[in-house]
């Protein structure tokens, strides 16, 4: 049946307010959890074993259930956080901001990364396996994707998530969660800045995402706004 105007409003509302907004929150909570665990001064070997187990579980879910790479990504980010336990807390937020910049600049350098020419081919293969391949064929195909997904084309998409992991790690290191009422003024400022900016960037990205023959510069700007929107709204929703 033809879509009604209500269908369009519902679809656009989901995209603006909900779509992809959970990933920044999950990343923030992951970073917070790692910081809380690091308070107990566990040996580095124990933390690495935890991340190896998380990575293994991620591989199983990706291969067997056609899941996404997020658990594997979190495991790798958790390993990257281990050296940061020795870094001063005030340096964590500037580091997070640098990864936001790397994520936002993704549309500029993504075509130069390894495997850029294989993106469309991989998507076509994945769709064919989903509709025509057997369960074992699908697992074999996804197993071939893992090295490429972990190395090629991951920097732009995961930089934004790692920025949110670092924000959560900073919150945990500052122990802000122990006395929320004392930090309410800061929380309100984040809320008042994060949500309006996030909504504005998301709406702009949605508008320029419509098929209207935009010039390449506008398309790059749109992709940059898309990379920023979820993190901005995620911070606002967390506040």
Image: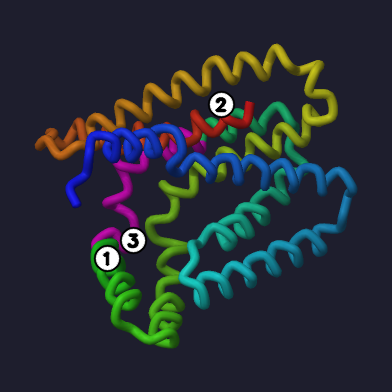
Q: Secondary structure at mark 1?
A: helix
Of the numbered discs in the image, which one, if any, rests on residue 236?
A: 2
Q: Which is nearer the N-term, disc 1 or disc 2?
A: 1
Disc 1 target residue: 118
Whole-percent x, y for residue 5 in the image: 23, 34
Q: Residue at x 33, y 55 (%)?
A: 113
Mark 1 and mark 3: Cα distance apart in space: 9 Å
Q: Nearer the viewer, residue 106 or 67?
A: 67
Question: Is 114 one of the magenta-colored residues?
Answer: yes
Whole-percent x, y for residue 116 in the image: 28, 59
Q: Secondary structure at mark 2?
A: helix
Whole-percent x, y for residue 27 in the image: 60, 45
Whole-percent x, y for residue 55 in the image: 63, 67
- Whether residue 137 sits left or right of residue 44 in the image: it is left
User: What is the span of residues highlighted in magenta in the rendered image?
Assistant: 99-117
**Placement of 194 over or under 38, stated as above or below:** above
Mark 2 and mark 3: Cα distance apart in space: 34 Å
Q: Main secondary structure of the magenta part?
A: helix
Disc 3 target residue: 114
Residue 52 figure quarter: bottom right
Of the numbered discs in the image, which one, if any, rests on residue 53?
A: none
Marks 2 and 3: which is nearer the front? 2
**Placement of 26 over or under 92, stated as above or below:** below
Q: Residue at x 80, y 64 (%)?
A: 45
Q: Residue at x 81, y 16 (%)?
A: 182
Q: Nearer the viewer, residue 158 or 23?
A: 23
- Whether residue 228 sits left or right of residue 7 in the image: it is right
């Amino acid at each position: 049946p033809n879509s009604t105007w209500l269908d369009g409003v519902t679809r656009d509302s989901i995209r603006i307010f909900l779509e992809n907004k959970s990933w920044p929150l999950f990343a923030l909570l992951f970073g917070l959890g790692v910081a809380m665990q690091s308070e107990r001064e566990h040996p580095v070997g124990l933390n690495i074993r935890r991340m190896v187990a998380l990575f293994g579980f991620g591989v199983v879910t990706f291969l067997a259930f056609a899941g996404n790479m997020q658990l594997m990504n979190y495991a790798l980010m958790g390993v990257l956080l281990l050296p940061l336990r020795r870094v001063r807390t005030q340096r964590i937020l500037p580091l997070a901001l640098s990864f936001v910049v790397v994520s936002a600049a993704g549309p500029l350098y993504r075509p130069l990364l390894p495997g850029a020419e294989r993106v469309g081919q991989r998507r076509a293969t994945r769709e064919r396996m989903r509709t025509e391949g057997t369960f074992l064929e699908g697992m074999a195909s996804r197993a071939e994707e893992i090295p490429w997904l972990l190395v090629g084309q991951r920097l732009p998409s995961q930089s934004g998530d790692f920025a949110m992991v670092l924000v959560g790690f900073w919150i945990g290191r500052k122990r802000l969660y122990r006395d929320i009422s004392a930090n309410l003024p800061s929380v309100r400022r984040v809320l008042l800045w994060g949500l309006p900016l996030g909504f504005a960037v998301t709406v702009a990205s949605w508008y320029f995402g419509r098929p209207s023959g935009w010039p390449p510069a506008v398309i790059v700007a749109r992709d940059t706004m898309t990379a920023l929107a979820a993190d901005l709204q995620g911070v606002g929703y967390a506040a």
